[in-house]
C-alpha cells in the first residue's frame, strides 16, 4: 500500500512558470493593491475593476505552462498516494499531471454568484462580464477566496494534513493563515520537508527537514530522497 504524501504548495511554485505573485513586490499585484482586487471591500467599491483584473489573469493562464516542479509532483504519484493542498488559484497542477488537488483559495477557472457560495460554475478561461448573472440572480464573480473571507476548504485540508505519512511545503513563506497552520496537524512522528531558497519562517523541529532550493530544484532533491 502506498504511503500518503501531502504537499502544501504556494505562489513560489507557480512563479517559475511566470505567474505573477505579490508578496515580493511591496504588496502590489500587477500594479494593483491587494485591497483593490482581492478583498470584499474592493469588490463592493469597484466590481468592474475586479472583474477586469481576474479576466486578465485568466487570459494570462493561457500563456504559461507547468514547470518541472509540477511535473515532479505528478511523477511522485507512481510511488505515493499524493495529495496536493494548494494556495494557488491557477490550474498548473492539473495541467502538470497531478490528479488529487485541493484548492484552498478557489480557482481562476471557476465562478460563482455574489451571494451563493455553494453553486460553482466551471468557466475555463472565458471572461466574466458585468451583467453575467448566476442562477440566484446575483452578479457572477470569480470563485476566489479573497483576504478577509472564510476559507471553507481548510477543514478538508486539516484532515489531509492529519493523514500524511510525509508532509511537504513548497513555494510558500508560511505567512498566510490559515494555510500556515496546517503543519500543526501533521502527526508527531511524520517527517516534514520544507523547500525554500530562504531561511524558513517557522522553527525547525526534529522531524523537519530543510531543503534550501527553489521549487523545481528542491522537489528534484526531494524525489531523490524519497524514491
Image (cartoon, helix red, strand yellow):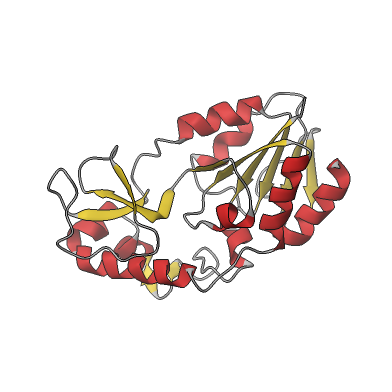
Q: Residue at x 47, y 54 (%)?
A: 89
Q: Quadrant of the C terminus?
A: top right
Q: Is residue 181 left or right of residue 34?
A: right
Q: How many marks?
A: 0
User: Can you give x and y, in whole percent of width and height, for residue 143 in the image?
Assistant: 34, 50
Q: Is residue 103 left or right of residue 37?
A: right
Q: Residue at x 20, y 43 (%)?
A: 115
Q: Nearer the viewer, residue 25 or 114?
A: 114
Q: Residue at x 40, y 76 (%)?
A: 31
User: Can you give x and y, in whole percent of width and height, for residue 20 in the image?
Assistant: 51, 69
Q: Hey, which quadrant is residue 57 in on the image?
A: bottom left
Q: Nearer the viewer, residue 102 or 126?
A: 126
Identify whether 157 is placed above or below 211.
Answer: above
Q: Is residue 164 left or right of residue 123?
A: right
Q: Residue at x 63, y 52 (%)?
A: 97
Q: Quadrant of the N terminus?
A: top right
User: Can you give x and y, in whole percent of width and height, for residue 122 in the image?
Assistant: 36, 51
Identify whether 129 is placed above or below 117.
Answer: below
The answer, for residue 173, to whether it is visible in the render is yes
User: Can you give x and y, in whole percent of width and height, for residue 140 in the image?
Assistant: 22, 54
In this view, the residue farthest toward the left is 137
The answer, for residue 185, to whether it is visible in the render is no
Amino acid at each position: 500500500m502506498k504511503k500518503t504524501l501531502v504537499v502544501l504548495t504556494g505562489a513560489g511554485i507557480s512563479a517559475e512558470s511566470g505567474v505573477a505573485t505579490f508578496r515580493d513586490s511591496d504588496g502590489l499585484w500587477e500594479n494593483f493593491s491587494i485591497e483593490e482586487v482581492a478583498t470584499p471591500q474592493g469588490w463592493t467599491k469597484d466590481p468592474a475593476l475586479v472583474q477586469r483584473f481576474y479576466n486578465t489573469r485568466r487570459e494570462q493562464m493561457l500563456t504559461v505552462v507547468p514547470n518541472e516542479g509540477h511535473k515532479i509532483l505528478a511523477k511522485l504519484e507512481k510511488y505515493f498516494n499524493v495529495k496536493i493542498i494548494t494556495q494557488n488559484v491557477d490550474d498548473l497542477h492539473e495541467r502538470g499531471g497531478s490528479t488529487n488537488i485541493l484548492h484552498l483559495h478557489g480557482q481562476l477557472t471557476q465562478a460563482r454568484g455574489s451571494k451563493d457560495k455553494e453553486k460553482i460554475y466551471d468557466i475555463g478561461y472565458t471572461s466574466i462580464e458585468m451583467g453575467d448573472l448566476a442562477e440566484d440572480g446575483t452578479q457572477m464573480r470569480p470563485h476566489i477566496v479573497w483576504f478577509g473571507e472564510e476559507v471553507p476548504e481548510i477543514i478538508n485540508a486539516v484532515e489531509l494534513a492529519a493523514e500524511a505519512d510525509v508532509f511537504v511545503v513548497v513555494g510558500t513563506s508560511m505567512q498566510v493563515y490559515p494555510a500556515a497552520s496546517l503543519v500543526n496537524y501533521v502527526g508527531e512522528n511524520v517527517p516534514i520537508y520544507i523547500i525554500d531558497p530562504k531561511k524558513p519562517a517557522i522553527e525547525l523541529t526534529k522531524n523537519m527537514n530543510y531543503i534550501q532550493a527553489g521549487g523545481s530544484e528542491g522537489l528534484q532533491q526531494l524525489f531523490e530522497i524519497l524514491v
